[in-house]
Amino acid sequence: MTQVSDRLASLSPSETLAMSQKSSELKAQGIDVINLSVGEPDFFTPDHIKEAAKKAIDDNFSFYSPVPGYADLRKAIVGKLKRENGLDYTADQIIVSNGAKQSVCNTLLSIVNPGDEVIIPAPYWVSYVEMVKLAEGKNVIIYAGIEQDFKITPAQLEAAVTPKTKALILCSPSNPTGSVYSREELKGLAAVLAKHPNIIILSDEIYEHINYAGRHESIAQFSELKERTVVINGVSKAYAMTGWRIGFIAAPLWIAKACNKLQGQYTSGASSIAQKAAAVAFAGDQSCVGQMREAFLRRRNLTVDLLRDIPGIMLNVPQGAFYLFPDVKAYFGKSAGGRKINDAADLAMYLLEVGHVAAVGGGAFGAPDCLRFSYATSDESLVEAVRRIKEALAALS
Ligand SMILES: Cc1ncc(COP(=O)(O)O)c(C=O)c1O
């Protein structure tokens, strides 16, 4: 029979990509859409990194790369983890993949057996729950609303743990909320995890450098957890390299070996050229990172100030990433022009079709009262986008 597998049928398509596509379609019809649905920096990759890639081509790095990544890149990652995070790893604990997305998926596929529970704090990045499904695990969602700055408490974590809990996925700074766990908050979660020695922690730190709260804090810093924490990171967000597809795990050796084995049968090593560029990103001049962070901070402040002016929008002030995640349920049940807004997905579609601003409904992130706006775009576009949002929302009654 020509029918996809049950495994595939159970997966949901990415709503963030769907919104981006819908907005591109409207653009293709000549409509001036401002796209705040995308999850990537709008900057170009810094020149010194591009030069490294050009050199790699000229130096004929055109052959298969080692499955876990080139030695110089893994060494640069070990150096980065020591320098920036105070964490000690050896190169054989680092596995380089096609983006942090593959790193998360490799890890889950390497540790989750059918029926194992994986705790995921909501709002969550869309792909976690789908990857757990792919691994035939069971998602256990803990919800943290805007009133608790979208961060789970130790008591919530404790209540979610069962004998079947295999892993916890933490994401700080967070996509979609921008929330950042402080050292004290992580310490509270670590104390709970210390009581449950079989739980593996996946710490997704891809937004590490887009953090306005100060120093990045990794849960791997707690020595009682380090031997069962998988740090996941990459070059996409910090160095404006989303298209280059380089991510990594820093993991206990047994997980690194498992991911290496999986990747060896599945994708092989990541792109040779992109790896050479990533080695320079991690080991080279870091001033570009601070410059981009400053621009993101300015845009966050601008957009928060403007959105706060709109009645019915409840907003916290996120300390990281480049997303705002307002609660918009005040608009549910309202109508304009015979069109009723029942939920966040309806509101996102209304803002796109009427206001010509693309955002993503919070349902995709496990938070159906919210909308996600990315402010990784120019100041002018942000000002105009919020003007349009305000006008479109004012028409609802
Ligand atoms: C929380 C989170 N983790 C991982 C990724 C994947 O990053 P990469 O481009 O390295 O695959 C993203 C990208 O949007 C993300 O938001």
Image (spheres, rainbow, N blue to C red):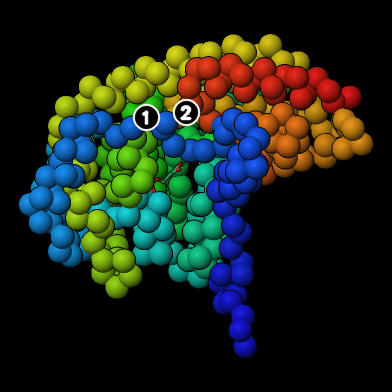
Residue under the image location 37 percent in, 29 percent down = 43
Residue at horizontal 29 percent and vertical 21 percent from the top: 290
Q: Where residue 174 appears, x then y in whole percent?
A: 48, 35
Q: Position of residue 79 (x, y in %)?
A: 14, 38
Which image quarter is the C terminus in? Answer: top right
The picture quadrant for ligand 1 comes to top left
**How many callouts does the rendering have?**
2
Q: Is residue 302 above or below residue 323?
A: above
* Residues packed near mark 2 inside 10 Å, few (<14), some (14 to 19) or many (20 plus): many
Residue 163, disc: none
246 relative to 343 in the view: left or right: left
Disc with the residue nearer the chain's start (1 vs 2): 1
Snapshot quadrant of residue 387: top right
In the picture of the structure, the residue carrying the numbered disc 1 is: 43
Residue 110's x, y, as percent?
A: 36, 64
Residue at the farthest left position: 59
The residue located at (87%, 37%) in the rendering is: 340
Tell me the kind of residue under disc 2: Ala
Taking the spot 48% from the left edge, 26% from the top edge, the residue there is 377
Q: Which residue is mark 2?
A: 376
Secondary element under disc 2, as helix, strand or loop, is loop
